[in-house]
Image: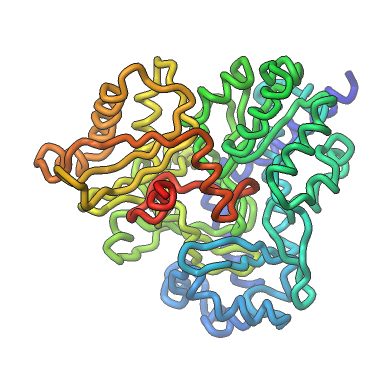
Amino acid sequence: MILKILIKLFALVQHYKNSFWIKNPHKAQERTFNYLIQKAKKTEFGRDHNFDKISNHQDFVKNVPIRDYEKIKSYVEKVRKGEPNILWSGKPLYFSKTSGTTSGVKYIPISKESISTHINSARDAILSYIYYTGNAKIFFGKQIFLQGSPTLEIINGIKTGRLSGIVAHHVPKYLQRSRMPTWNTNCIEDWEKKVEKIIEETLVENMTIIGGIPPWVQMYFEKIKQKTNMPISKVFRNFSLFIYGGVNFEPYRNIFEDLIGKKIDTIELFPASEGFFAYQDKPGREDLLLILNNKIFYEFIELDHFKKNKFKRLTLKDVITNKDYVMIVSTNAGLWSYNVGDTIRFTSLKPFRILVTGRVKHFISAFGEHVIGKEVETALNKTLKNTDVKVVEFTVAPQNNPESGLPHHEWFIEFDNLPESLSEFSKKLDDFMQEENIYYKDLISGKILKPLVIRKVTKNGFKIYMKKIGKLGGQNKLPRLSNDRSIVNKLLN
């Protein structure tokens, strides 16, 4: 009883602390901007970009251009060689190793100042949940976050590995006793073997919190159900909170509720190697609270402008709701006006809340329609509503050269159970796609495109594909859509 009161008190105190920056967002961003510039003046990047002459955002825009990884890579390579004071003061504690579509492997620096923001933001998300729900019982059992291996290699004195593996080294002491799985199991590289071992360890435990990227948690749940012939809620009777990030949960929700055997509370997080950007601060809300106290300065470019190579950079003072923006960040790990590749949409300006609408490079515009991830996910969710149909996974690609008829969008879907009529399901899905994207509607009505076509993917087809390309499990995600057929051609093979 005393422990439960202390946890709730901790949640109350943290809620009160966060209210200061939530209610004063522009002051929080101004402080962050000044801190970052002052801290990095004497770095090589700071000298190269006249940080000593920067006093406001206009100066910053003039001196620091927008960058992606390729344009900052020359600085990163110096850091990787062990040189200090290049992008940030001193050397980073870690490099987060990620795979890029154009840059190959990317090495994102994580400093001693920035690592704490990853941990504290995840903590605040859970405390916010406790503040609003009063459910402190989640800490009276075991917790698991399905993640990549925490094994790190050392390159010129800097530890290097996957973000989830790095974070595993910083689990707070008060969670270490209840954390699952064991360290040795977490270090298993083969994802299928790792899941089997995790099941062996967790089946006998009182699991209360389970977290991870939905498709890989789904794999964990499916294997448990196969072993026990029971829904997850019967296996883990006190399991009451699922924490996820990386992909939209909605396409998986029906499958999860079927596997679990009941509805369950969820928290969505928006972490990345570049920083922890947002979390779902209120249960039941679809949008996420943009974090403004973690030493990240945000800029935004309207997506429509970005596509036309017009890079007018806005701050929080300039944004409006219901418009898609490319998110640009400058961080206390030494990323400067860095395009993280995500597109977001503001749902609220008091406080600043967002939806993640997709990836800049993940879209279909083979015919000028520029369909984004949020649109295909929303259309599918509307089609699934009030049906018994369940979708395991899907991706969408253009079919530019069909054997007959007009070009079209091709949806590759792995169903858990099929619709009674696939043609009716396809028509509904196409109708909702036209509602979501006016350009797509114009192309259909103008007979430039014919309505979408669904291709059924065999059971476990996506998992087999991910395994073949070496991306099964961990933080790896299947792109929802692409502007070419590189993914679906491999699926077809």
x and y percentages locating residue 344 in the rendered image: 43, 47
- In the displayed structure, would residue 60 be above or below residue 371? below
* Horizontal side of residue 447 vs 204, given as left or right: left
x and y percentages locating residue 27 in the rendered image: 56, 53
Quarter placement of the N terminus: top right
The residue shown at (60%, 63%) is 331
Residue 8 shows in the view: no
x and y percentages locating residue 396 in the rendered image: 36, 43
The residue shown at (43%, 47%) is 491
Residue 73 shows in the view: yes
x and y percentages locating residue 216 in the rendered image: 62, 39
- In the displayed structure, would residue 60 be above or below residue 218? below
| Closer-to-camera residue (169/289) | 169
- When asked about the image quadrant of residue 125, the answer is top right
The residue shown at (79%, 47%) is 186
* Horizontal side of residue 446 vs 11, given as left or right: left
- In the displayed structure, would residue 488 be above or below residue 49? above
Colour scheme in use:
rainbow
- When asked about the image quadrant of residue 453, the answer is top left
| Closer-to-camera residue (324/162) | 162
- When asked about the image quadrant of residue 336, the answer is bottom right
The residue shown at (17%, 39%) is 450
| Closer-to-camera residue (187/28) | 187
Extreme front residue here?
A: 493
Extreme left residue here?
A: 446
| Closer-to-camera residue (155/404) | 404
- Give the mark count: 0
* Horizontal side of residue 240 vs 60, given as left or right: right
- In the displayed structure, would residue 148 be above or below residue 10? below
